Image: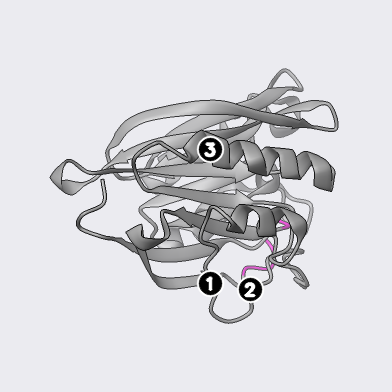
Amino acid sequence: MAAYNIKHGRGMDGAVDLARIAAVLRALDADVITLQEVDNGTERTDGVDQAAVLADLLGYTDYFGAHRPFQGGQYGNAVLTRLPVRASRTLAVPPASGSALSIHEVELKLGGGRSASVVSVHLAGSPEERLAQADRLSEIFSAVGRPVILAGDFNGRRNGRVLTRLGADWHVPPKQGDPNTFPADLPDREIDFILLTPRHAFEVIEHRAIPEPLASDHRPILAVLRLGPGDR
């Protein structure tokens, strides 16, 4: 799976180019992708449904979840997948600087009647606001009864307060190689993560940041995960 904050398709050169974003994602060949900072029908991106455009370019199905109205449309998260989906939902989390914020969950249908949830996450605001958002994430998924993957932009560093708080409930696997994801051209901080629960449900085969310096202000991250046969 992959996660990518696409900054509404705007690259480090200032150009909005969804075909370029799609080319980055195509090379990752992930079964499921979470996206953050996605526009749907906004003025700044010419009214385009960005998740739908990317899904069409890649041959995936798109699931968009709005944070809030923005410039005549909506702004939020998305999940793209080529796996069958049982359900999807957008869930509110505590706001950032008074502005509504949400996460978007897609429950995937896996073999043998199993399922797992993949959640597109973009935490924002002050450390206190992000701590409240982190607490809400753990509360929502503490008893869903299936493996859950949180993937996206947490706007906090691995050893910071927010990730430390989440680490009490979630496995935060290390990345191979340079883990830094922001800013894309000369990254000096790791703020994009994939978190897993329960810890024993997943084997992490590979997990790394992708050295893409141009298409967005974040670098994408990729994880190859194996789900244990007994987890449902």
Please identify the residue farthest to the left as the structure is shown. 112
Q: Which residue is mark 2?
A: 179
For label 1, the crowd category at 10 Å Cα-Cα, with few meaning under 14, some 14 to 19 and many 20 or more, is many
Question: First in sequence: mark 1 or mark 3?
Answer: 3
Instruction: Name the residue carrying label 1.
Output: 208
In magenta, the rendered stretch is 212-217
Horizontally, residue 209 falls left or right of residue 58, namely right
Q: Position of residue 223 (x, y in %)?
A: 45, 64
Between 32 and 189, the residue placed more toward the observer is: 189
* Residue 41 visible in image: yes
Give the mark nearest the N terminus, 2 or 3: 3
6 in relation to 213, above or below: above
Q: Nearer the viewer, residue 213 or 90?
A: 90
Q: Residue at x 58, y 40 (%)?
A: 137
- Whether residue 47 is visible, yes or no, is no
Q: Is residue 31 left or right of residue 180?
A: left
Tag in front: 2 or 3: 2
Q: CA distance from mark 1 to mark 2?
A: 7 Å
Q: Is residue 70 left or right of residue 195?
A: right
Q: Alpha-carbon distance for marks 2 and 3?
A: 23 Å
Type of secondary structure dominating the magenta stretch = loop
The amino acid type found where label 1 is placed reads: Arg
- Residue 135 in the image, given as x and y percentages of width and height: 65, 41
